[in-house]
Amino acid sequence: MTRLPATLEDGETPRARGADRHAGDGALFAAAFDELIGAALVLDNQLRIRLATPAAAAVLGTEVPLGASAATLLCGDRPKRPFAEALAEGVGFQAVIPHPGTLGGEQVRVRSVPVSSGAEDSAPLGWIVYLSPVSGNDGEPVLFHGMWTRDARMKETFRIIEKVAGDDVTVLVRGETGTGKELVAHALHALSPRRAGPFRAINCAALPPNLLESELFGHAKGAFTGAIKDTMGHVQLADGGTLFLDEVGELPLELQAKLLRMLETHTVLPVGGREAISVDVRIVSATHRALRAEVEAGRFRADLMFRLRVIPVRLPPLRERPADVLLIADKLITELNARGRRQVAHVAPAAAAALERHPWPGNVRELRNVLAYAFAIGEGPVLELGDLPPEVASLTPPMAEVLVPAVAAAIDEGASPEARRIRDALARTGGNRDRAAKLLGWSRVTLWRRMRALGLEE
Ligand SMILES: Nc1ncnc2c1ncn2[C@@H]1O[C@H](COP(=O)(O)OP(=O)(O)OP(=O)(O)O)[C@@H](O)[C@H]1O
Ligand SMILES: [Mg+2]
């Protein structure tokens, strides 16, 4: 999860900012959600749009007016009832709707997840609506160095990789866990003139700082207890080849300085060593974080970030490329069939729907694990819904549980205490104003007047 920099100055209380608080928070939450879940809208329980991520505006091809009805935005003049009714039932749903911003055959996949307060039987506080483009013409599957896709952005990424592989420029691959960052690093190596040289990978998050330093840069005999001989680090071992720095965002600041020096001088100084040693390595790094935010938070050096990401590459999460789920599942099933334990000839429609609906927080790695589970649990030539692990087979995606507290806070954040009380009352009464007014100890007219004053009334 991205850590966000604090936006308040030292000594400043949130209250002191009062006036510009809303706009600031709106942008902050939109960016934060963009980071977390990509193209998505957050709706309140009246189905009004409370937050839209920048990616959502990009998918919809239009500015998203906050406060407007989601049904109107998504359905335009077309019947809104199926959308509103599905949400009113309080369960998540998935549908493919015509693109609101174009007249052509383009479509958008919408997947909604209710946001509840967690109290039993409570009506949803609101909704997260995930959006993804369903483009008719990105359909052709391609295979690129172990990566299958039908997604136009992935194909563009492959084109960039092919183009830059031959140069020694640094590449920073950004993507959630399991999106194929390591495959990209291997592809860059395999497509470069360094392919005959070594490929070394090191995970910067996996070791404590002093061990990491010696693993990366090596150490001289006697540098510390147990250093019985001169030992080469990964940088030297990758000489003539490619060094893959995984989770580079976790590199401690002292080592960032040392890495920067290595990039600038093409030399390394082993721990306890006296002389710098020349090296010829190409650096590819990966991160699941936005390095820029790390820089702003003072945890990552800006100069190093610019050095590392001469070519930035972003791998979209699987939930942003829904057409890839069944394609990759199909390829993985072929792979698992070859192991001979079970032969799956096809996937039952209910199981396919569950795979498509699942948000895949662990991306392709999770998909691989889920299919391995299905092969181990089930029998026969048809992969059934019951073969899938419960978190995939059930309607409520696990991602929703992770996000619910954050989203509920975001919906609440911009509201005055009174607005919050009113919304709570409405949520608890399923939007029934008579009962909500009673709960608040007001007349129906007072409720209506307060709602209008607070801008809660349409
Ligand atoms: N597009 C794809 N098609 C087929 N398999 C894929 C694809 N993307 C990833 N995989 C597979 O998914 C698994 C995870 O890929 P990889 O290790 O490259 O991800 P990662 O981004 O490095 O993950 P992490 O951040 O957790 O290290 C691997 O088994 C890889 O082969
Ligand atoms: Mg990896």
Image: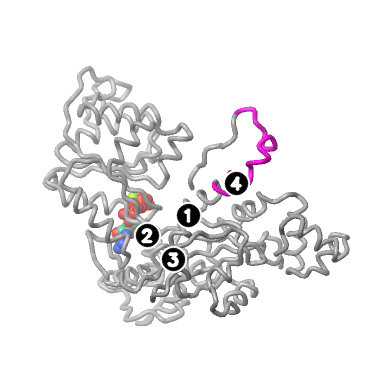
Indicate yes or no: mark 2 CB to ligand 1 under 8 Å: yes
Counting residues from the N terminus, which is met first, the one under dot 4 or under dot 2?
4
Is residue 399 visible to us here?
no
Badge 3 marks a residue whose secondary structure is strand
User: Alpha-carbon distance for marks 2 and 1?
Assistant: 27 Å
Callout 4, which amino acid? Answer: Ala
Instruction: Using the image as rendered, state which of residue 155 and residue 365 is in the foreground.
Output: 155
- Image quadrant where residue 341 sits: bottom left
Q: Which residue is mark 2?
A: 365
Q: Which residue is mark 1?
A: 54
Between disc 3 and disc 4, the foreground one is 4
Q: Which mark is residue 23?
A: 4
Callout 2, which amino acid? Answer: Arg
Q: Which residue is mark 3?
A: 132
Badge 4 marks a residue whose secondary structure is helix
Does residue 94 appear left or right of residue 365 in this picture? right
Q: Give the residues in magenta.
A: 10-27
Q: Quadrant of the C terminus?
A: bottom right
Badge 2 marks a residue whose secondary structure is helix
**Residue 77, image x, y percentages:** 55, 77
